[in-house]
Amino acid sequence: MSNEEPKQKINVRDWIVLSTVMIGAVLTILALIWQQPPDNGIITSTFLLMVSFIFFVNSVSANSKAQFEANLSNVSETRINRFVTLAEFSFGLGFTLVITGFTILGYEYLLTHLAPPLVALILPITFLITTWIIIFIWTYYI
């Protein structure tokens, strides 16, 4: 028997797929919002969504690099974990920017098509509270 422990396989394929789906979603939303833009907030939302695109592309790249490095025999686990951590932070920042952009867009679209601003304010508040609850559950209970 060998003294070496079997190398633990790292599975980042699902994160690569998820980040790729987010890239497609962001680009689709960008194409759709410019077809009928709200009265305000389109520039800010576009900026946030374009920056999130960069973070999702970086997440795919970092996850792919982690998967490649994990398949090599002489790479330290610390190096692989650095790529995984970079990918997680990139995805988290990108997702935060998407949530912020959607909140602004939702509010502005409702404000454009509904008369009372107070009713339009219910959407971003509900959207953000729901998102924070899900993030809290993922962070502390899973």
Image (spheres, rainbow, N blue to C red):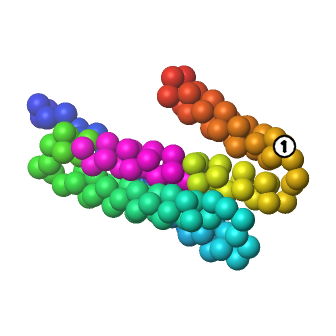
Place residue 130 in its image quadrant.
top right
Tell me if residue 133 can be seen. yes
Q: Nearer the viewer, residue 45 or 64?
A: 45
Judge whether 14 appears above or below 29 on screen: above
Q: Which residue is mark 1?
A: 119
Judge whether 33 appears above or below 130 on screen: below
Residue located farthest toward the right when viewing the structure as drawn: 115
Tell me the residue at 40%/62% (across/down). Answer: 54
Residue located farthest toward the top when viewing the structure as drawn: 141
User: Residue 95: x, y in percent?
Assistant: 51, 49
Tell me the residue at 14%/35% (across/down). Answer: 4
Q: Main secondary structure of the magenta part?
A: helix
Taking the image as shown, residue 125 lies to the left or right of residue 64, namely: right
User: Residue 45: x, y in percent?
Assistant: 58, 60
Tell me the residue at 18%/55% (across/down). Answer: 72
Q: Nearer the viewer, residue 133 or 77?
A: 133
Q: Nearer the viewer, residue 84 or 122?
A: 122
Q: Residues within 10 Å of mark 1 (few under 14, many from 20)?
A: few
Q: For the residue marked with disc 1, what is the amino acid? A: Val
Tag count in the figure?
1
Residue located farthest toward the bottom when viewing the structure as drawn: 35
Tell me the residue at 51%/58% (across/down). Answer: 48
Q: Quadrant of the N terminus?
A: top left
User: Residue 133: x, y in percent?
Assistant: 63, 30
Taking the image as shown, residue 142 lies to the left or right of residue 28, namely: left
Place residue 119 in its image quadrant.
top right
Q: Secondary structure at mark 1?
A: helix
Assess whether residue 85 is covered by the magenta stretch.
yes
Assess whether residue 88 is covered by the magenta stretch.
yes
Q: Which residues are magenta?
A: 82-98
Place residue 76 in its image quadrant.
top left
Taking the image as shown, residue 71 lies to the left or right of residue 45, namely: left
